[in-house]
């Protein structure tokens, strides 16, 4: 299991007066949105009915297109949903404490499946198309419910999710971290810099200088806090961006390779295969067949 010594930002969440659940519905994806590496004790359910972006939850990094339904467990670090490119869809965000209905409520036999759902959510869960189609409209309607009806509606949603077989665990090997406040600004700055500059060459001297560290100290710090090398993380960002370009436009694979920051086509092919389990050309064909 990856041990994460990074200190993500602790996000303070305030529910509306008289409510133990926070529900937000956004009809526009703001281009100015800046994702940050953060966590919170609240469980988070996010449904995007039309949109695209990168998902960075725990040690998982991927690109989604068209829609997304994820459940993020208590204190699981995530980097938000970036690259929000559409203004035609909406995002519904639901946040609540694991014990929002009181200590022991989910210990009842009738709540066993939901309790198990919360446990699985500690590793992050992404749900498939079948579940999204079944429950998406219910999640969106939750913002219209108030008080007791909102709680009943949320419990129904959680019950449906707990019975779903149409899901993937994002961090199958688990994910844990220790809190070191002094690391917070450094790791957030590093991830932000990678997200903004992965399409260009980023030298170790350059990134180490950004966080006022020597290269050896930076390499030790980054490997300890993420479990991976800086080069591996940057290449993962590049491959994820390549999946986006392969799915959305007709540029040649060679052009996409260089646009994503790779300077060697064979190296790109090797890393793409390692990351996705298939070649870039096969990935594009599969995406085209899905669209058709």
Image: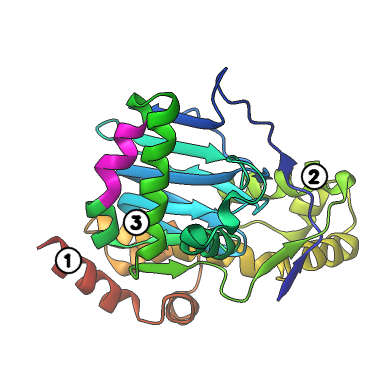
Q: Which residue is depicted at the point 49% across and 57% down?
A: 111
Mark 1: few, some, or many residues within 10 Å (few <14, many ≥20)? few
Contact, mark 3 vs mark 1 (Cβ under 8 Å): no
Q: Is residue 140 magenta?
A: yes
- Ranked by sequence position, the earlier of labels 3 and 1 is 3
Closer-to-camera residue (89/100): 100
Q: Which residue is depicted at the point 41% across and 41% down?
A: 154
Q: Is residue 252 above or below residue 99?
A: below
Residue labelled with disc 3: 160
Segment colored magenta: 135-142
Mark 2, secondary structure of its residue: helix
Displayed quadrant of residue 174: bottom right
Using the rendered image of the protein, determine whether residue 150 is visible from the camera's viewpoint. yes
* Residue 184, numbered label: 2
Return the x and y of residue 224 as percentages of the image width and height. 82, 67
Q: Which residue is depicted at the point 29% across and 41% down?
A: 138
Q: Is residue 15 magenta?
A: no
Label 3 vs label 2, nearer the camera: 3
Closer-to-camera residue (53/237): 53
Contact, mark 3 vs mark 2 (Cβ under 8 Å): no
Return the x and y of residue 17 as percentages of the image width and height. 57, 17
Q: How far apart in space, not on screen, are marks 3 and 2 (Cα)?
A: 36 Å
Using the rendered image of the protein, determine whether residue 86 is visible from the camera's viewpoint. no
Residue 161 horizontal side relative to residue 105, left or right: left
Residue labelled with disc 1: 290
Residue 213 horizontal side relative to residue 121, left or right: right
């Amino acid at each position: 299991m990856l041990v994460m010594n990074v200190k993500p930002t602790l996000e303070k969440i305030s529910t509306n007066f008289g409510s133990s659940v926070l529900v937000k519905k956004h009809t526009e994806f703001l281009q100015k949105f800046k994702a940050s590496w953060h966590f919170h004790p609240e469980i988070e359910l996010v449904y995007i009915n039309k949109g695209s972006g990168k998902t960075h939850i725990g040690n998982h990094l991927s690109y989604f297109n068209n829609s997304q339904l994820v459940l993020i467990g208590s204190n699981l670090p995530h980097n938000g949903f970036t690259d929000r490119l559409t203004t035609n869809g909406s995002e519904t965000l639901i946040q609540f404490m694991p014990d929002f209905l009181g200590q022991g409520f989910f210990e009842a036999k009738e709540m066993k499946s939901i309790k198990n759902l919360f446990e699985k959510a500690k590793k992050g869960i992404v749900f498939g198309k079948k579940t999204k189609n079944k429950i998406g409209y219910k999640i969106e309607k939750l913002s219209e419910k108030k008080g007791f009806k909102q709680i009943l509606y949320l419990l129904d949603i959680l019950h449906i999710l707990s019975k779903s077989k149409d899901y993937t665990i994002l961090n199958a090997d688990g994910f844990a971290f220790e809190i070191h406040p002094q690391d917070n600004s450094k790791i957030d700055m590093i991830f932000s810099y990678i997200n903004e500059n992965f399409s260009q060459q980023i030298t170790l001297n350059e990134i180490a200088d950004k966080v006022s560290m020597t290269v050896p100290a930076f390499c030790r710090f980054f490997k300890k806090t993420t479990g991976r090398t800086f080069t591996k993380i940057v290449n993962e960002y590049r491959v994820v961006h390549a999946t986006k370009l392969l799915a959305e436009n007709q540029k040649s694979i060679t052009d996409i390779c260089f646009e994503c920051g790779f300077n060697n086509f064979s190296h790109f092919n090797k890393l793409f295969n390692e990351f996705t389990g298939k070649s870039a050309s096969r990935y594009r064909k599969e995406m085209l067949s899905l669209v058709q």
